[in-house]
Amino acid sequence: MPSISAPARILVTGVNGYVGAHVAKDLLDRGFIVVGTVRSSVKGGGIAKYFKHYGDRFSYVVAQDMSEPGAFDSIINTGNFDGVAHTAAPIPSSTAISATKGPPKDMFNAAIEGMLNVLESIQNYGHSVKRLVFTSSTLAALQSEPGVVHNETNWNDEVVKHVQERGDEATDLECYMASKCLSERAAWKFIEDNKSRLVFDLVTVLPTAIIGPPVNDDMPHGQLESSNRLFDGLKSFRSDSQLLDTWSTVVHVKDVAVLHSEAFLQPGAAGRRLFAIGANPSWQDIYDCLNEDPPFPGVPRGNPGVGKGSDTESLEWDMERPRFMLCWAEA
């Protein structure tokens, strides 16, 4: 497919969410026209207020439940979109981060159904759509074997099997990991099964733990991505000394947003799974990042500027494609 460049029209699902808002802002800053989906007009009004300086290049529509069949039909049918960024997804509650057990999670099916609803709506009504960019996660590709260099062929089938076996005993976080794997797999299967009839292609973006400030300081804490809420969950049962050097790779939310935009702009991104992996920092690095303007609520300041990265071993990821696309330096 050819590249999609400004002033093309892009639909961003979950535009009031942590990642969705940053994706929308990056697209708007590049001159795109953005229509965002929200679950209520109240949430839409809040994000519209923040984006008001973009004038009529930003608007929102209400999609109350993305897992409902046809949830996006009328939106895509009347939107005349050139591209769709599907960032909306169910995320675990803050208690999930500390591995609280619970019943089978609605997120498990909602993520898959929401993904398929977007794909089916584009297939049936989105005749102008050239590309769908889906926000997945490195959790969808995570491997437990030591020494694996993760690449686009890897899938976290182990956690899917684990959740299926544990049933009601599976934690929210485990279900979230499985939902990311299954929803992305469902997307690629849909593309393969319907490739002879499709006029659009798919790109998936797989970030690691996402950090960085929300797009505006008025965003409620509860709306932020689970990656940022991980701080609260870990903080509740780990001391500062234990926390200092126990962190995996992270990526800044602004880099994740840029990678979404570049996925539309670059023809060579078609059919690719793009990892978004940053550094392996210390907790002081995390504190410094989350205290950027606007600061993330309730984060300690520690000793600003003294973080030098963690000495803990991190997983390896094949970053050749995203580094080429974004001119990223080696972390």
Image: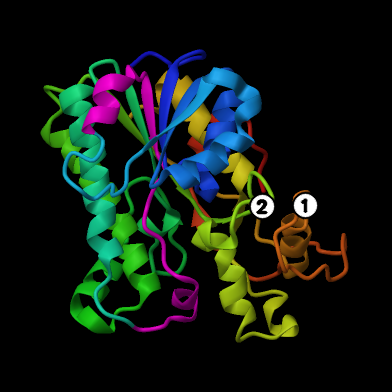
Q: Going from the N terminus, do you reach mark 1 or mark 2 first? A: 2
Does the stretch in magenta take in 82?
Answer: yes
Residue placed most toward the observer, 287 or 15: 15
Give the number of the disc on residue 212: 2
Report which residue position mark 1 lands on.
292
**Any part of residue 185 in sight:** no
Left or right: residue 230 versus residue 204 is right
Which image quadrant: the N terminus?
top left
> Measuring 21% from the left and 47% from the top, which residue is drawn there?
186
Mark 2 neighbour class, 10 Å CA radius: few under 14, some 14 to 19, many 20 or more: many
At which x and y percent is residue 148? 43, 60
What stretch of residues is rendered in magenta?
A: 73-101
Disc 2 secondary structure class: loop
Number of disc labels: 2
- Position of residue 102 relative to residue 183, above or below, is below
Left or right: residue 312 versus residue 199 is right
Disc 1 secondary structure class: loop
At which x and y percent is residue 310? 71, 67
Q: CA distance from mark 1 to mark 2?
A: 8 Å
Does the stretch in magenta take in 158?
Answer: no
> Measuring 63% from the left and 37% from the top, which residue is drawn there?
50
The reply to whether the C-beta atoms of the residues labelled 1 and 2 are less than 8 Å apart is: yes
Query: Quadrant of the rendered structure where residue 102 is?
Result: bottom left
- Position of residue 258 relative to residue 243, above or below, is above
